Amino acid sequence: MDCLFCSIAAGDIPAKIIDSDDVSVAFLDIEPFQDGHTLVISRKHVTSVLDDDGELARISPMVTKVARRLVDSLGASGVNIMSNAGEVAGQSVHHLHIHVIPRYDREPGISAIRSTMPRRPIEEVAAIVTGDPHRK
Ligand code: 5GP
Ligand code: ZN
């Protein structure tokens, strides 16, 4: 099947992967709303949260783990956690994913979730979150 996120999970398309386990993969979003914006995906191909009863629960430990790690490593003060299901909701990649968006005191509030400020280079953020200064 031709699916971008299945290809990232399989390692066929590169991504800034920050964590993974048997059921999920977490990687930095290529167009971050805020620095450290991460997607947690299921390894199993599921179209969205509407498409499967159990997959959201299976990947939720990774969502919590990644949220805490982003807050601790990047100095965020909170997170927004969101999943778009269906094109009407803004879903553009039709493979289940949870957006974990770190939030910073300089841009608080739900209306400021998508920043207009310039973002830090994704390589720099990957190095900070993984603790690996040589991370590309
Ligand atoms: P959706 O709009 O479906 O809720 O979210 C899809 C997300 O995937 C978007 O935030 C978009 O920036 C991200 N995205 C799309 N293509 C790629 C890619 O090739 N690599 C990465 N890391 N993120 C991607
Ligand atoms: Zn897929």
Image (cartoon, rainbow, N blue to C red):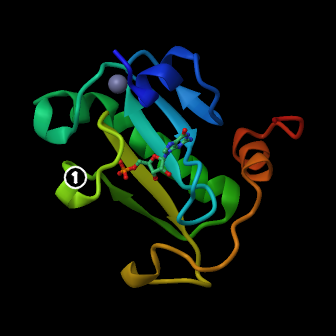
Kindly identify which residue carries mark 1: 87
As rendered, which of 114 and 38 lies closer to the eye? 114
In the image, what residue occupies the spot 43% across and 38% down?
40
As rendered, which of 10 and 107 lies closer to the eye? 10
The image shows residue 22, relative to residue 42, as above or below, that is: above
As rendered, which of 105 and 28 lies closer to the eye? 28
| Coordinates of residue 55 in the picture (x, y in percent) | 22, 28
Crowd band around label 1 with a 10 angstrom C-alpha radius: few (<14), some (14–19), many (20+): few
Ligand 2 visible in quadrant:
top left
| Coordinates of residue 108 in the picture (x, y in percent) | 49, 83
133 left or right, relative to 85: right
Q: Quadrant of the N terminus?
A: top left
81 left or right, relative to 68: left
In the image, what residue occupies the spot 76% across and 49% down?
128
In the image, what residue occupies the spot 12% across and 40% down?
50
In the image, what residue occupies the spot 70% across and 73% down?
118
